[in-house]
Amino acid sequence: MPAFLHAFGMHLPERVVTNREIAARVGRTAEWIEGASGIRARRWAAAETSVADLAVAAARDCLTRAGIAASALGLILVASGSARPGFPGPAAEVAAQLGLETTPALDVPMASAGSLFAMAMAAQMTGRFGDVLVIGAEKMSAVIESGPLDPNTAMLFGDGAGAALVSERPGRWEILDTVLHSDGQFRDALAFDWSAPLRMHGLSVILQAARKMPSAIEEVLARQNVAAAEVAIFLLHQANQNLLVRVAKSLGVPAERVYSNVGRYGNTSSASLLIAAAEWSQANSTTRGPVIFCAFGAGFHWGALLARGT
């Protein structure tokens, strides 16, 4: 049964944290941070704001744009790698804040690739649950502030949330195919458990991401006989600008065909893909043609989703 993407939503905290602010705390310069990552600023949430709070704000934006009430939802999937440990996860609180009492709400505890995996799952579950709301929400500032600041990671991350409505009802984009992969051999290269600072072996992460993201995109395109040159936009996890450029080069497409907002928001982990989709879709309401969604994250988990404008 076909599944469709109807709308996207997003939420970003008001506080803007500039490179100058980060640089003063980690002994670098603002120029060095931008040169290393392409990031100029990021958003950080207030101390009292939770992952669920961010998720609910993005959910409401998405539901408004889709023109449906929360009560119409059959299922909620909340992806986050930065939610506080323990149980229940943020999904239950999200459902409660939306005023839902019996709607199933599931957590997808994955960093960076979580929203893509949740979208793929949603596409398979609409026949059973109807309208499925996918949310990616991250408070990465809490992860960064949980220990001594590392110059190589403190500069990267921001907070925010994005959301997508997936349904079996015909909508703006039809989901054509997805590919998902995992390789646990590299699970220690990017890890965080709240007992110690974020651990990231940057060279391993960037090399694997730069190989696996284009590979997943090429795999899903080949399965649907679509050429990379035909794709209207590539919506990727916004890890850093250098990675986005490398993926474009690997695919042989112009760099501007790969959407980028990482310079303004930093790396918002599992929220970044849906924030990028929300921004792009709001500015390009009449765009037709194939659209690629792709993410890579801790685990390692990675994949791609192909949709086409209707």
Image: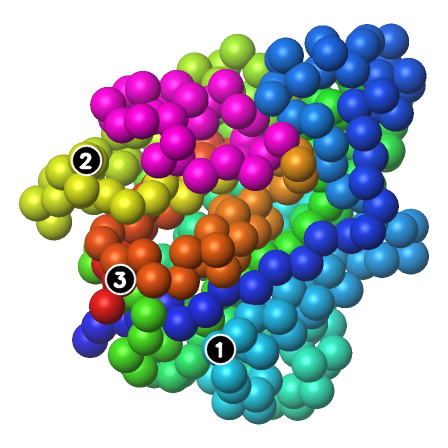
Marked residue nearer the N-terminal end (1 or 2): 1
Q: Secondary structure at mark 2?
A: helix
Q: Please tell me whether the stretch drawn in magenta is mainly helix, strand or loop.
A: helix
Quick check: 207 left or right of 191?
left
**Mark 2 neighbour density, 10 Å: few (under 14) some (14–19) many (20 or more):** few
Q: Secondary structure at mark 1?
A: helix
Q: CA distance from mark 3 to mark 1?
A: 16 Å
Query: In this rendering, is residue 294 above or below 137?
Result: above
Q: Contact (CB < 8 A) between labels 1 and 2?
A: no
**Mark count:** 3
Amino acid carrying mark 3 in the image: Gly
Query: In this rendering, is residue 207 above or below 8?
Result: above
The quadrant holding residue 176 is bottom left
- Write the residue at 8% across / 45% down: 225
Here the colouring is rainbow
The residue identified by callout 1 is: 66
> Which circle marks residue 309 in the picture?
3
Marked residue nearer the N-terminal end (2 or 3): 2
**Residue range of the region highlighted in magenta in the rendering:** 238-263
Q: Secondary structure at mark 3?
A: strand
Amino acid carrying mark 2 in the image: Ala
Image coordinates of residue 53 in percent, x first then y, are: 77, 64
Amino acid carrying mark 1 in the image: Ala
**Mark 1 neighbour density, 10 Å: few (under 14) some (14–19) many (20 or more):** some
> Considering depth in this image, is 215 or 105 the residue closer to the camera?
215
The residue identified by callout 2 is: 229
**Is 244 contained in the magenta span?**
yes
Q: Report the residue that reaches farthest toward the left.
A: 225
Query: In this rendering, is residue 147 above or below 101?
Result: above
